[in-house]
Image (tube, rainbow, N blue to C red):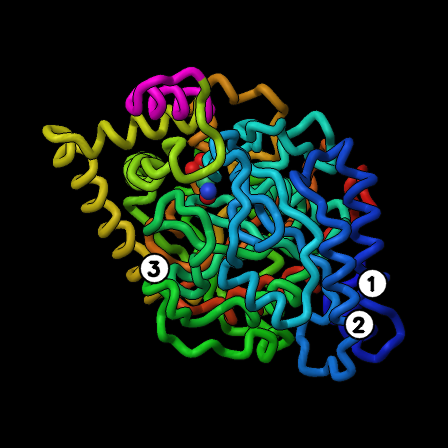
Amino acid sequence: MKSISNLRDGIVRGETTARAATESALNAAEKLNDSLNAFLEIDRAGALNRAAQVDAQSEKTDLPLAGVPFAIKDNICVRGMQTSCGSRILGPYHPPYNATVIDRLIAAGSVIIGKTNCDEFAMGSSNENSAFGPVKNPWDLSRVPGGSSGGSAAAVAAGIVPVALGSDTGGSVRQPAALCGVIGLKPTYGRVSRYGLVAFGSSLDQIGVLAGEVSDAAAVLQVIAGRDSSDATTADVPVPDYSAELNEDVKGLRIGVSRVLLGKGVHPEVRAAIEKSIEAYRDLGAEIVDVDLPHAKYAIAVYYIIATAEASSNLARFDGVRYGFRAKDAPALKEMYRKTRDEGFGPEVKRRIMLGTYVLSHGYYDAYYLKAQQVRTLLRQDFTRAFEKCDAVLTPTTPTPAFLFGEKVDDPLAMYLNDIYTVTANLAGVPGISVPCGLSSDGLPIGLQLLGPYWSEARLLRLAHAYQTARPLNARPRVFA
Ligand code: GLN
């Protein structure tokens, strides 16, 4: 797989065409989808049209992503394609507009080849909650790709596209990136517009980038970041040049490690890989310091209260009236709502709507929702304190490598515990990146996670790039284009 800059420069110089790049991505997507189930829609005609427009443009030097093929998670609206969110209840929906990130990608010259499979409404860590069957992990088809952006992660890992967009509410970009051996970047809350992203937990959601190479993640963030008048939660903070400091060394940067987070519950091979990566950073000249995140142990509980509360409110709009699917044989309005939601939503989404409604209900609000918000503030303060001592905190991205299909699906709590390292970043609003840091004895990828202060994406990318350059993952998944 070529990096974006090689591909784009070749197209700009006329050595290859957007059409050729698009065709090869489309061919790979069609060929591998039987085994991976990574795409819910592949738009051959639309993508070739778009590629022709790029090729027809005489001046391409001002297109930073000229002809770069993209895959987009199926909860981000792209005009002319479906949006299902991995759910039956949307019908699917065909949005008459583009998400802001999509407008920006298109203006930069990229070509969207299709929409990727995901857990229903982005709720899950294994892709087993998609109404359209799970995505398979390209490294081992009997294992999960992670979730919820599993289709985007698998499409990048299998070399179908160099880059893809996902969404990250509690780890859904970083966790599948780790399990599929690719880069996953979740920006600071407010860095990237959420306009056109179907809402799950609005105070947590952020669109992120999956890429084979850190430099490609930087190039994509450059295009999608920044203030958007259609999303009032985007911040008016200048967007730096994310590629400028990529190649600077990491000497003198301080990396915080919490020994407690490397304690019980971590797979021994994950712990060993993380210890090795800490040594690798030390060899690169970084200073390793001890940090403490005393409230991190409450993160899962807090996340699964706040995320479900917000989801129960956000998903109230899917009632058979405005979008897609409507149940048949429901003579009265209430019956129609009830049957539509019963038939349209899968079991995990229903579980979360019930949990969320419960924690918001009169009599329980103070005990659960309010308490969770208070602990969320404490968690935020943990990070503020940690970042007084270090430039980034390093943790595993996930406690284990990719697990088997069916292994955790009947035990929601075991599934939720997979998010132990990722949900803190969303609760605090800080950015995070997952970088492949080794393979398990079964040949499965392991990811390290770096978390930084607000707006520190440039530094996180630099730290990740230094690691990827020094210790590249010199292996390919079994299923590869
Ligand atoms: N796995 C987490 C969940 O199930 C995170 C999902 C996400 O980030 N969208 O909620």
Q: Identify residue for label 3.
A: 386
Q: Secondary structure at mark 1?
A: helix
Q: Amino acid at mark 2?
A: Asp
Query: Residue 431: x percent and y percent?
Result: 44, 59
Q: Identify residue for label 1.
A: 19
Residue 257 appears left or right of 212? left
Q: Amino acid at mark 1?
A: Arg
Q: Quadrant of residue 189?
A: bottom left
Q: Give the residue at x 36% y 69%.
A: 235
In front: label 1 or label 3: 1
Residue 267 in view (yes/no): no
The disc at residue 55 is 2
Q: Residues within 10 Å of mark 1 (few under 14, many from 20)?
A: many
Residue 75 within the segment the image draws in magenta: no
Residue placed most toward the observer, 403 or 25: 25
Query: Residue 398: x percent and y percent?
Result: 52, 40
Q: Which residues are magenta?
A: 329-346
Q: Amino acid at mark 3?
A: Ala
Q: Give the residue at x 73% y 29%.
A: 141
The correct choice, above or below, for 261 with respect to 394 in the image is above
- Rounded to the nearest angstrom, the CA distance separating label 1 from label 3 is 48 Å
Query: Residue 100: x percent and y percent?
Result: 49, 63
In terms of image quarters, where does ligand 1 lie?
top left
The correct choice, above or below, for 445 with respect to 76 in the image is above
Residue placed most toward the observer, 33 or 460: 33
- Rounded to the nearest angstrom, the CA distance separating label 2 from label 1 is 7 Å
Residue 258 in view (yes/no): yes
| Dominant secondary-structure state across the stretch colored magenta | helix
Q: Earlier in the sequence, mark 2 or mark 1?
A: 1
Kindly tell me whether mark 3's CB lies below 8 Å from ligand 1.
no
